[in-house]
Amino acid sequence: MVALEDPKPYGAMVGERLGLKQGCRICEAGGGYGSLMKGLLGKYSATVGHAYMIDLSWSLLKRQREALKKRSPFITFINGDIMELLPALSGIDFLIVNEVIGDLDTVKDVDYDDLPAEASELIKKYNLEIPSEGRFNFNVGAILLVEEICRRGIPAFVAEHSSDPVIPEDMDFLERGIVG
Ligand SMILES: C[S@@+](CC[C@H](N)C(=O)[O-])C[C@H]1O[C@@H](n2cnc3c(N)ncnc32)[C@H](O)[C@@H]1O
């Protein structure tokens, strides 16, 4: 934020991009510590009619509840998997999925000459560029989520900067605290 000409929280910037309308209903999947929604509601609490926070993790949902306690009458917290809940979502004006798609189901160590059926279908369907030699990881979940968002016609903000489904050998401290 310090480096920005017009410093503001990331969530406020996302809200600005969405062009929120009065009374709109927004849903964030995978809210982590709740910082994005806190920033967004910090600027747009008078505009947003209701917010829904869906997260797979109970403990992160608790963190979100804590971070957003000032705004809690306008927020519903839901413990669940966005991949399962998305087909049932209705009446949502915007869906926010920030830094979550890298966590979705990924087929690891895929061999170009022996592609699993699901990966092969998606690669053909979208004419995806894949490495022609060696093995690679293929995030099936990310594609299926975006497909479902488009099928349902839900306006969405989806962002991911990078992801690595394999924890590097010398960084096993990253596994600490990961449950099931
Ligand atoms: C890397 S954090 C991103 C947090 C936050 N959106 C941000 O940008 O700081 C990923 C979040 O997505 C949640 N998550 C991962 N897979 C999910 C799924 N299938 N359904 C719902 N939430 C999921 C995690 O529990 C976590 O809260």
Image: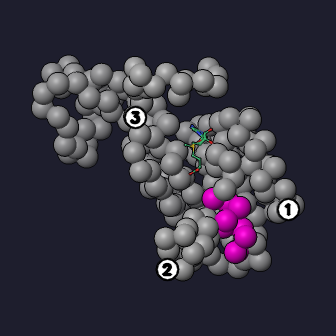
Q: Main secondary structure of the magenta part?
A: helix
Does the magenta-highlighted stretch encompass residue 127?
no
- Name the mark nearer the viewer: 3 or 2: 2
Residue denoted by label 1? 70
Count of number-bearing discs: 3
Going from N to C along the chain, the mark reached first, 3 or 1, is: 1
Mark 3: which amino acid?
Asp
* Label 3 environment density (alpha carbons within 10 Å; few <14, some 14–19, many ≥20): few
Q: Is residue 176 visible?
A: yes
Q: Which quadrant of the figure has residue 179?
A: top right
Contact between marks 3 and 1 (CB within 8 A): the answer is no
Q: Is residue 71 above or below residue 179?
A: below
Between marks 2 and 1, how big is the CA–CA gap?
A: 28 Å
* Mark 1 lies within 8 Å of ligand 1 (Cβ measured): no
- The residue depicted at 53 percent of the width and 28 percent of the height is 174
User: Quick check: 159 left or right of 114?
Assistant: right
Residue denoted by label 2? 5
Give the extent of the magenta segment. 36-44
